[in-house]
Image: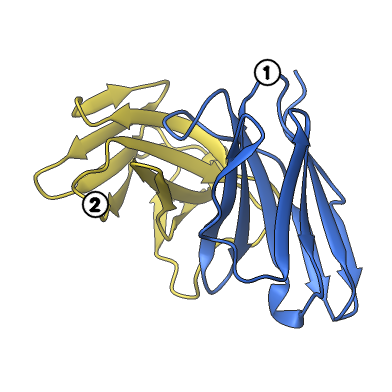
Amino acid sequence: GESVGLHLPTLSVQEGDNSIINCAYSNSASDYFIWYKQESGKGPQFIIDIRSNMDKRQGQRVTVLLNKTVKHLSLQIAATQPGDSAVYFCAETYGQNFVFGPGTRLSVLP
Amino acid sequence: DAGVIQSPRHEVTEMGQEVTLRCKPISGHNSLFWYRQTMMRGLELLIYFNNNVPIDDSGMPEDRFSAKMPNASFSTLKIQPSEPRDSAVYFCASTLQGLNQPQHFGDGTRLSIL
């Protein structure tokens, strides 16, 4: 499927290295954050989430960090694999609003 | 487990025609979301339902767009009349309840209006 805007940031990482994808969110009142992965021709797929009362959460090979002071969210992927190549979106919820970020394309080099 | 099911996967039609996109959420999920994705605007939330009731339709572009959820297992997004600028991939997603949970997405409908 198509991804996002013409100026989609791209991160190229060597296979086996760690990846860090960053996201600046918009609203200081946001209380729930999610990272999604989208592969070509598919819908976004949930990776990991974090609530505003936490600053770190770990999953399998992934870690999300939340810095509320500067409204910054990051996704760390350990030992990046070719199957990790995709577009990654952060999303935030505040009140009845849910907003996706513009996305980052991760390209894993052999 | 069956995920969110959307149909059709692809739709090509001429401008002015009515288009109906369909979505079956995950069984037991009470919230359903419609999104549009384009190169220029990314992923946009169009409307979401909670317990079959529309909660927020502020993202619906204009009156040509309408969405319904007649029961817990089915929703439609209709465009009438369609225009070339409506060409996009339309996604449906569902959660158990509300916005503060991971959304499960279908694989989308790629719509082309000629």
Alpha carbons under labels 2 and 1: distance apart: 31 Å
Measured as percent of width and height from the top left, residue A13 is found at 40, 50
**How many numbered marks have been drawn onto this rendered protein structure?**
2
Is residue A109 visible to us here?
A: no
Q: Which residue is mark 2?
A: A27
Label 2: which secondary element: loop
Q: Secondary structure at mark 1?
A: loop
Q: Quadrant of the N terminus of chain B?
A: top right
| Residue in front for this viewpoint, A60 or A82 | A60
Q: Badge 2 sits on which subunit?
A: A
In the image, is residue A96 above or below residue B29?
A: below
Locate residue B65: give its quadrant.
Answer: bottom right
In the shown orientation, is residue B3 left or right of residue A80? Answer: right
Image position, residue B88 (x, y; %) = 69, 67
Front-most of residues B24 and A2: B24
Given residues B68 and B105, the one toward you in this image is B68
The residue depicted at 12 percent of the width and 50 percent of the height is: A70
Residue A90: x, y in percent?
39, 47
Which amino acid is tagged 2? Asn
Left or right? Give the position of A93 relative to A8: left
Q: What amino acid is found at the position of numbered circle 1 in the picture? A: Gly
- Chain on which label 1 sits: B
Chain letter for the part of the structure drawn in yellow: A
Q: Is residue A14 left or right of residue B37?
A: left
In the depicted structure, whether residue B81 falls above or below residue A59: below
Give the residue pinned by disc 1.
B28
Q: Is residue A82 above or below residue B46?
A: above
- Chain ID for blue: B
Q: Is residue A35 visible?
A: yes
Q: Residues within 10 Å of mark 2 (few under 14, many from 20)?
A: few
- Residue at 30% across / 33% down in the picture? A64
Work out whether A60 lies above or below B94. above
